[in-house]
Amino acid sequence: MIPKELKYTESHEWVRVEDGIAVVGITDHAQHELGDIVFVELPETDAEYGAGEAAATVESVKAASDIYSPLSGRVVEVNEALEDSPELVNKSPYGDGWIFKIEISDPSELDALLDADAYAKHIGE
Amino acid sequence: MLYNPHTDEERREMLEVLGVSSVSELFKDIPAEIEAPRIDIPGPRSELEVREELKRLQAANEGEGLPLFLGAGAYNHYVPAAVSHLVMRSEFYTAYTPYQPETSQGMLQAIFEYQTMMCELTGLDVSNASLYDGGTAVYEAAIMAMRATKLRNRVLVDEGVNPLYRSVLRTYSGNLELEFVEVPHREGRTDFEAFRRLMDSDTAAVVVQNPNFFGVVQDFSALAEAIHELKGLMVMAVNPVAAAVLKSAGEQGADIAVGEGQPLGSPLFFGGPYVGFLTARQKLVRQMPGRIISETVDREGKRGFVMTLQTREQHIRRAKATSNICTNQGLVALTACVYLALVGKEGLREVAVQNLSKAEYAKKRLSAVEGVRVKWDAPTFNEFVLELPSDAGRVAKELVREHGIVAGLPLGGYYDGMERDLLVCVTETNTAAQIDAYAEALGRVL
């Protein structure tokens, strides 16, 4: 399941742009590979990240993986629902399981992201 | 594990494969000046001879069997005989934390009980399975506070925290991007005003000790409130025996409590092995270092114990683990657990009250000696600072040489301008007769 309208990274994050704000989560493929997610360590609101910097961590029963910010910018909102219900990342990776939103500081960075076809190829589908 | 040393034959074969004639030829590129010096070890002796030699060395220890008034972080408490009997059972006799739940239910349960007891003593929610010692526990707590506050990198440390713990903090953090600011004490107490001035939104934590190194007992509730307003944390090092009668770290608002577990059933051991404990509020559990043992049920619904939240640890999170500690002082933690279970809630309180009242008696007797006074008028637990009319190091030396009394810790080596001050510790093991003899001897050497 790779929605056409989203952008992707090789490290398995997805991005949805809404009015200059990028919503970030991890792909269905990523959640499937990680297994049951038991904890999401969210970034602080207002924290600034460069593209490719670790901003959050997801933990499954046996592994902990960094989530990299696909774009540079400032965190404007985090999905606090994940604090009590980390399993949303498994159940709805592209919907209720979003992780954080950042205010895009350099829109040209969007061009460097993968589209759905390129991501599908990247994961061998 | 089998250990078979190489035979001469095997060495010869290896050298042949390598194409060298001797071991020294193999290492010939190593400059002579950095080679390990030759150590002149005498030839083998019989078990009986070795035992006699060790006995002779042991007898040369001057402090052996003397009345002991030295504390300063390591405390001479009575250890009931059942403690060593139980912890030396072969089922328990390992320093490692076993983590295979299918083979180690007994040990895991013991650690779980230990954690429960530490939580009760410190008034906090969660405990880990132990750390190396009090000093490293303070460091782990400071680093934990930095992680929990999203990498704020400033930690304010009260000078009333054991100087050795502060030295561990400096050593561990030498190459890290974090700043320890030491806040000087004021007349043996925490300088709360200075803390207020120095605290800011970059401060991850304030680190205090209760009772502090001078034995002084304080209430840190207001400091906790102040640091919480800035969204920082309070780390409190506590004496676990004193914790039986004092307002707990949790009640005082501490977010992380740490300390040295040696007073709980371990002898002085000439400085180690000791054990560090660390407890915290539930919301910090994912930032905790070390192992955590939890209670669960197996598939038949029976109670069992497992390691939990292992994703914090280095075998899963690698470089980003909360700490590099995993194997630790399991046996000494078990000792603390056995000791606490044996003496019980009432017993520990009784030990604490005896320490307190004997120390008060010693204060009275020793300060009655001419020229001697209790340095600060402050509530203390089982230690206090005596101000002497002359150099405390000299007095302590004379007391041990001429009167066979280990008088305490001269503070000059640890705090500027305290050359005449002596830190005196009294536990339940010190008798009134010992205290009287100390006072009399002190009068003579001054």
Image: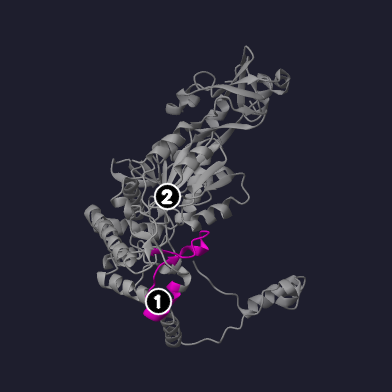
Q: Amino acid at mark 2?
A: Arg
In the image, B383: left or right of B320? left
Dot in front, 2 or 1? 1
Please give the name of the residue rendered at 44% of the width and 41% of the height, measured from the top-left corner.
B234
Q: What residue would you read off at disc 2?
A: B189
Name the foreground residue: B90 vs B331: B331
- The answer for which chain carries disc 1 is B
- Determine which residue is flagged by label 1: B445
Q: Secondary structure at mark 1?
A: helix
Q: Which residues are magenta?
A: B395-424
Q: Does B305 sit left or right of B410 as displayed?
A: left
Name the residue: 30% across, 58% down: B338
Marks 2 and 1 sit apart, C-alpha to C-alpha, by 30 Å
Along the line of sight, the residue nearer the viewer: B19 or B290: B290
Q: Are the residues at dot 2 and dot 1 in contact (C-beta closer than 8 Å)? A: no
Residue at image x 43%, y 73%?
B395
Residues B402 and A38: in front is B402
